C-alpha cells in the first residue's frame, strides 16, 4: 500500500517507520520547509524522535503535492487544533486516494467536532474515513514492544482491509465500528491523564490516581453515551486501555504536563518547554463545552479545566472533588 502521512512529529514518524518495515511505501509531509529539508537530509527527527532515524526509503516532503502523489491511504497525524487547516490544504490539492486514516486524538475547540467529522466534512468526497486509536505510546512502538490498538469506521469491509494491512507482529489491531466512542475516549482520556499527572505532581499516591482513572472513565462514558456512543466501547482499547496507559506512563506528554502543573510550574512555561503538544490542554476546554451542551456532570474534567483555565490551585480542586455530596457508585 502507498501511504502518505501528514505530520512528522513523534507518532507520525513512528507510524511511518513501522509501516515501512511492514512492507508499505511511505511518504511523510512536514509543513515546515526548513525542518523537512533537515530531516530529509539527515534522517534525524529529533527532538520528536530520538535514537531512531527515519529510513532513507521514506521521503520527507514539505511540498504537500509531492507527499500526496500516488497515495492510496492518507494518514492524518497532526495536533488536533491544526487538523482543520491541514484538511483545507488537502482539499485544495484534491488528492486522489482510496481512504483517509485518522491518528489525531482531540476535539476541535471552536467547532467541537471530532477528527473524523472534520476530515469527512472538509474533504466531502466518496472516500471513507477511519480512525486508529488505543494505548499507543509511540516510543514503545518504535522499540518493538507489544501494542494493541483498534481501528474503527463505518465501512466494515474497508476497516477489515486496513486492519489486515497495518497490523504487524508487535502491533496488533482489533476492528470496531463505534467511531464516536473511539474518538471521544481518545480525546477525553487526555484530560483525565492531566488530572492524574497533577495528582502525582502533588505527591499523592496510587489510591488517588486509581480513583481518578476509575471515576474518570465513568465521566467519559457518561458523555459518550449521551452523544450516541456505545457504553461498552469505553471499557476497551480506545477507552480504558488508552486512559490507563496515558495516565501512568512517564512517556505520556499529558501525564508529564500534569506533573509539572502539580509541582507548581506555570502552564505557559510548561508549554514552552514541551517539545510536543499536550492535547489535554485544549481538549479540556472542548470537553467543558460538550458537557454543558449535553447536560452531563463531569467533575474531574471540570476540575482540570478550573486548574488550567481558571487559575484554580490543584489542592483546592482536589479538596472540592473530595467534598462533593456522597452518593452511590
Image (tube, grey):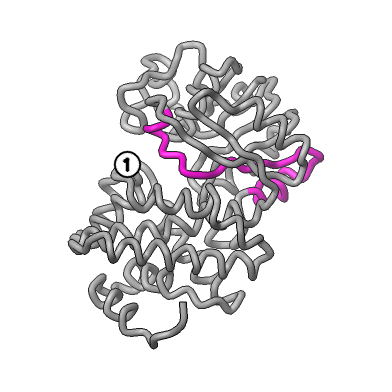
> Relative to 17, does residue 182 appear above or below in the rendering?
below
Task: Looking at the picture, tell me which residue is in the foreground, 240 or 188.
Answer: 240
- The part of the image, by quadrant, that contains residue 50 is top left
Task: Looking at the picture, tell me which residue is in the foreground, 245 or 57.
Answer: 245
Indicate the quadrant containing the N terminus: top left, top right, bottom left or bottom right: top right
- The part of the image, by quadrant, that contains residue 227 is bottom right
> Relative to 204, does residue 171 appear above or below in the rendering?
above
Provide residue 19's location: percent of width, then percent of height.
55, 23
- The part of the image, by quadrant, that contains residue 74 is top right
Provide residue 104's location: percent of width, then percent of height.
54, 45
> Relative to 106, does residue 160 appear above or below in the rendering?
above
Q: Residue at x 65, y 51 (%)?
A: 118
Provide residue 282's location: percent of width, then percent of height.
44, 59
Which range is magenta? Answer: 116-141
Q: Residue furthest top?
A: 57
Q: Residue at x 50, y 67 (%)?
A: 218
- Please tell me how crowded label 1 is: few (under 14), some (14-19), or many (20+) other residues with Cα within 10 Å: some
Task: Looking at the picture, tell me which residue is in the foreground, 232 or 181.
Answer: 232
Tell me if residue 117 can be seen: no
Task: Looking at the picture, tell me which residue is in the foreground, 170 or 29.
Answer: 170
Q: Residue furthest bottom?
A: 325
Tell me if residue 315 can be seen: yes
Q: Residue furthest right?
A: 126
Q: Is residue 200 left or right of residue 96?
A: left
Query: In the rendered image, which residue does mark 1 sit on?
Result: 251
Q: Is residue 56 magenta?
A: no
Amino acid at each position: 500500500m502507498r501511504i502518505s502521512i501528514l505530520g512528522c512529529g513523534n507518532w507520525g514518524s513512528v507510524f511511518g517507520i513501522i509501516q515501512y518495515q511492514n512492507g508499505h511505501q511511505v511518504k511523510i509531509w512536514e509543513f515546515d520547509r526548513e525542518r523537512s529539508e533537515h530531516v530529509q537530509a539527515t534522517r534525524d527527527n529529533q527532538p520528536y524522535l530520538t535514537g531512531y532515524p527515519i529510513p532513507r526509503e521514506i521521503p520527507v516532503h514539505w511540498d504537500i503535492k509531492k507527499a500526496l502523489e500516488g497515495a492510496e491511504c492518507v494518514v492524518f497525524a497532526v495536533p488536533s487544533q491544526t487538523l482543520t487547516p491541514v484538511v483545507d490544504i488537502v482539499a485544495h490539492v484534491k488528492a486522489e486516494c482510496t481512504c483517509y486514516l485518522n491518528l489525531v486524538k482531540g476535539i476541535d475547540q471552536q467547532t467541537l467536532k471530532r477528527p473524523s467529522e472534520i476530515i469527512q466534512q472538509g474533504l466531502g468526497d466518496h472516500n471513507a474515513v477511519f480512525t486508529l486509536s488505543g494505548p499507543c505510546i509511540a516510543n514503545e512502538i518504535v522499540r518493538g514492544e507489544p501494542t494493541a490498538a483498534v481501528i474503527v469506521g463505518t465501512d466494515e469491509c474497508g476497516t477489515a482491509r486496513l486492519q489486515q494491512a497495518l497490523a504487524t507482529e508487535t502491533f496488533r489491531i482489533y476492528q470496531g465500528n463505534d467511531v464516536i466512542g473511539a474518538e471521544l475516549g481518545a480525546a477525553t482520556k487526555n484530560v483525565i491523564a492531566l488530572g492524574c499527572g497533577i495528582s502525582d505532581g502533588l505527591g499523592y499516591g496510587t489510591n488517588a490516581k486509581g480513583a481518578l482513572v476509575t471515576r474518570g472513565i465513568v465521566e467519559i462514558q457518561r458523555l459518550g453515551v449521551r452523544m450516541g456512543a456505545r457504553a461498552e466501547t469505553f471499557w476497551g482499547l480506545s477507552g480504558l486501555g488508552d486512559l490507563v496507559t496515558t495516565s501512568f506512563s512517564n512517556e505520556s506528554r499529558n501525564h508529564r504536563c500534569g506533573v509539572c502543573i502539580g509541582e507548581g510550574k506555570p502552564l505557559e512555561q510548561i508549554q514552552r518547554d514541551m517539545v510536543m503538544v499536550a492535547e489535554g490542554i485544549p481538549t479540556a476546554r472542548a470537553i467543558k463545552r460538550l458537557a454543558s451542551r449535553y447536560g452531563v456532570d463531569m467533575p474531574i474534567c471540570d476540575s482540570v479545566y478550573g486548574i488550567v483555565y481558571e487559575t484554580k490551585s490543584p489542592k483546592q480542586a482536589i479538596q472540592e472533588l473530595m467534598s462533593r455530596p456522597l452518593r452511590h457508585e
